[in-house]
Image: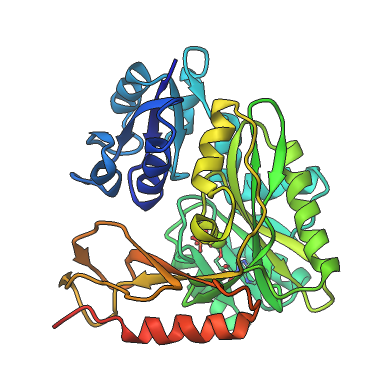
């Protein structure tokens, strides 16, 4: 019997999950999302919507009552409420895993305990402690807010001792941790999945280009040696073996100057760096997530075409309704998220430039991306 899928979060990830669910009507009859924004992106693909805050206990209970299985597309949901629901409802990835991942310090402790390589880190409880850690670690370090951070907004790079107090007080007594600053040569990620039967699969490692802490471009596959590729994919596999629950996970990593791989952080959900799979791969990350939580056999993660994904971000100098964006090109696939209002750096959509001729020329694909990116305008 087809199931009702409940999703916490109905933004662009919820939209693309709903679209994947619409293609799997044999297994999913319909989708309900919980999201505070009326007419959220997922609702535009036919998802029903409960309008409430992601952490609203009553709304989560209502979602659980109306759904057969629950998943989420944001990591800031209420893991304590989900934990309480676990006896009655099927929730994946497991609330226990969500709780670990939500707190960067707990996440790093978990990875350390499981011997998964990460940057050296410490808990920070007060300014004096931070100063002592810095004497030991040396500079630079990255001071991080433990919870609810995104797009690098909870990070402060400390490069000199006179910045320490300012960095510490900028976070208004929120729980903090500090990490050694890694002078990485590349940021990569692996989209990994595990189904309810324990089957694990990984997509090929991809390269991520950030600008001002926001993902701008993902290059699939990453321009790394086979040794680095294998290392990244096997670390992702090992991580999936120790994490409980089913679903797709986005595992962000650094490649250091001596080709070591360190995990930066894990997202317990479909991930921006997996959007290329909509065109590049036999199975999209969205279908894979649904297959994983439904207990279906995982789909093939083979990359059939080299692809570069580019995020379409709201321009810095503009706030308001923007004109419809179109791209007329055989090799570019545009996905807009149905957000009517542009705000600076808001993720409004993305496009994938696909190597349709199989030339495997990554530089050419990046050139195409830049041409298209520069041709997009938001105002008349
Ligand atoms: P996201 O950007 O994925 O929303 P976030 O705000 O939680 O996540 P992180 O992923 O922890 O932040 O860090 C954002 C960026 O900061 C990373 O992509 C990386 O470029 C840089 N960064 C994070 N930790 C370190 C580190 N220890 N050393 C060097 N750079 C780091
Ligand atoms: Mg990150």
Q: How is the image coloured?
A: rainbow
Position of residue 190 in the picture relative to residue 379 (left or right): right
Q: Position of residue 137 (x, y in %)?
A: 76, 70
Q: Position of residue 5 (x, y in %)?
A: 40, 28
> Extreme front residue here?
357
Count of numbered circles in the view = 0
State which quadrant residue 58 falls in.
top left
Is residue 292 or residue 242 the one in the foreground?
292
Is residue 211 or residue 39 the one in the foreground?
39
Q: Could you tell me which quadrant the C terminus lies in? A: bottom left
Q: Could you tell me which quadrant the N terminus lies in? A: top left
Is residue 281 or residue 213 the one in the foreground?
281
Position of residue 304 in the picture relative to residue 133 (left or right): left
Residue at the image point whose x is 42% and y is 20% from the top: 2
Give the answer, above or below, for where 141 lies relative to 16. Answer: below
Is residue 203 or residue 315 the one in the foreground?
203
> Extreme top residue here?
88
Give the answer, above or below, for where 181 lies relative to 374. Answer: above
Give the answer, above or below, for where 223 lies relative to 82. Answer: below
Position of residue 66 in the picture relative to residue 243 (left or right): left
Is residue 159 at least partly visible in the picture?
Answer: no
Residue at the image point whose x is 47% and y is 53% from the top: 174
Q: Position of residue 50 (x, y in %)?
A: 24, 32
Is residue 304 at least partly visible in the picture?
Answer: yes
Q: Position of residue 211 (x, y in %)?
A: 48, 78
Residue at the image point whose x is 35% and y is 72% from the top: 313
Residue at the image point whose x is 62% and y is 73% from the top: 358
Ligand 2 shows up in which quadrant of the image?
Answer: bottom right
State which quadrant residue 139 falls in.
bottom right
């Amino acid at each position: 019997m087809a199931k009702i899928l409940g999703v916490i979060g109905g933004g662009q990830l919820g939209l693309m999950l709903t679209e994947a669910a619409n293609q799997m009507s044999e297994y999913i009859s319909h989708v309900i999302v919980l999201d505070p924004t009326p007419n959220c992106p997922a609702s535009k693909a036919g998802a029903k919507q409960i309008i409430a805050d992601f952490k609203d206990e009553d709304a989560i209970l209502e979602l659980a009552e109306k759904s057969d299985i629950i998943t989420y597309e944001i990591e800031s949901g209420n893991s304590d409420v989900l934990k309480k629901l676990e006896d009655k409802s099927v929730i994946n990835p497991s609330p226990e895993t969500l709780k670990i991942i939500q707190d960067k310090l707990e996440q790093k402790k978990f990875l350390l305990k499981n011997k998964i390589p990460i940057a050296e880190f410490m808990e920070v409880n007060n300014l004096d402690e931070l100063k002592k850690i810095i004497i030991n670690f040396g500079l630079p370090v990255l001071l991080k807010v433990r919870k609810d951070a995104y797009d690098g907004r909870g990070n402060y790079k400390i490069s000199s001792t006179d910045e320490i107090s300012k960095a510490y007080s900028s976070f208004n007594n929120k729980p903090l941790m500090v990490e050694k600053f890694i002078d990485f040569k590349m940021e990569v990620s692996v989209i990994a999945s595990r189904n309810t039967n324990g089957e694990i699969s990984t997509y090929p490692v991809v390269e991520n280009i950030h600008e001002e802490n926001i993902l701008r471009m993902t290059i699939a596959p990453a321009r790394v040696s086979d040794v680095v590729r294998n290392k990244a994919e096997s670390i992702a596999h090992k991580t999936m073996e120790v994490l409980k629950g089913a679903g797709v996970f986005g595992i962000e990593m650094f490649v250091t100057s001596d080709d070591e791989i360190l995990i930066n952080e894990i997202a317990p959900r479909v991930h921006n760096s997996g959007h290329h799979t909509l065109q590049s791969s036999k199975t999209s990350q969205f279908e894979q997530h649904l297959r994983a939580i439904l207990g279906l056999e995982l789909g093939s993660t083979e990359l059939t075409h080299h692809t570069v994904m580019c995020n379409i971000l709201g321009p810095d100098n503009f706030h308001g309704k923007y004109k419809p964006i179109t791209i007329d090109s055989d090799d570019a696939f545009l996905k807009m998220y149905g957000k009517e209002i542009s705000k600076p750096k808001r993720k409004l959509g993305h496009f994938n430039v696909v190597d349709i001729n199989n030339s495997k020329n990554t530089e050419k694909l990046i050139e195409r991306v830049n041409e298209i990116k520069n041709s997009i305008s938001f105002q008349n």
